[in-house]
Image (cartoon, rainbow, N blue to C red):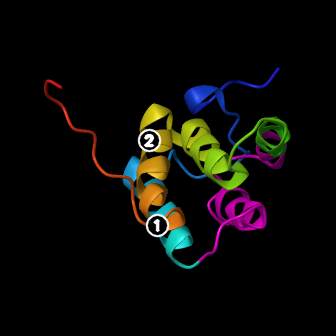
Amino acid sequence: MREQGIAGGFPPPGSSPSPSAAAISGSFLRLGIVSFGGPAMIAHIKEMSVIRNKWLTEETFKDGVVIFQSVPGATAMQMAAYVGLRAKGVRGSDGTLEKNRGTWSWPPSPPHCSGSA
């Protein structure tokens, strides 16, 4: 049986140490700036997270694709959050969503207001 890594993921043999949340956020920010979104983004996310940075194994990435193509919602956004979660836990997941919220859906969502109504 394989030993579990960060956030329950199984890092590939010889992989680099766990990425920082800033590295994950920066990578998805760059990806979000130069891309148009949609299901075609899955190939770009795979290239970045499995092949180039080795944050996930091929098997773990495919598991995420199966899950998020079977539930409603934006598959690319869900995969970004999944990659962040598997690579760095909740901080990584939150960083991918925060960086991509403004680039993949323009204009960005307004901040939540607090106070009495």
Which residue shows up at 72% across the image and 50% down it?
75
Which is nearer the eye, 97 or 21?
97
Q: Residues within 10 Å of mark 1 (few under 14, many from 20)?
A: few
- Looking at the rendered structure, the kind of residue marked 2 is Asp
Label 1's element?
loop
The residue at the far top in this view is: 1
- Looking at the rendered structure, the kind of residue marked 1 is Trp
Residue 106, numbered label: 1
Where, quadrant-wise, is the C terminus in this rendering? top left
For marks 1 and 2 on the same chain, the one whose residue lies earlier in the sequence: 2
Label 2's element?
helix
Which residue shows up at 66% across the image and 67% down it?
37
89 vs 107, left or right, is: right
The magenta stretch spans residue 42? yes
The residue at the far front in this view is: 117
Label 2 sits on residue: 94
Do the residues under discs 1 and 2 have CB atoms within 8 angstroms?
A: no
Q: Which quadrant of the view contains residue 115?
A: top left
Where, quadrant-wise, is the N terminus in this rendering? top right
Locate residue 3, reporting x and y percent.
70, 24
Locate residue 113, reporting x and y percent.
21, 38
Residue 96 appears anywhere in the view: yes
The residue at the far left in this view is: 115
Q: Is residue 46 above or below residue 7?
A: below
Which residue shows up at 78% across the image and 67% down it?
40
User: Which region is colored magenta?
Assistant: 35-61
110 vs 94, left or right, is: left
Foreground tag (1 vs 2): 1
Q: Residues within 10 Å of mark 2 (few under 14, many from 20)?
A: some
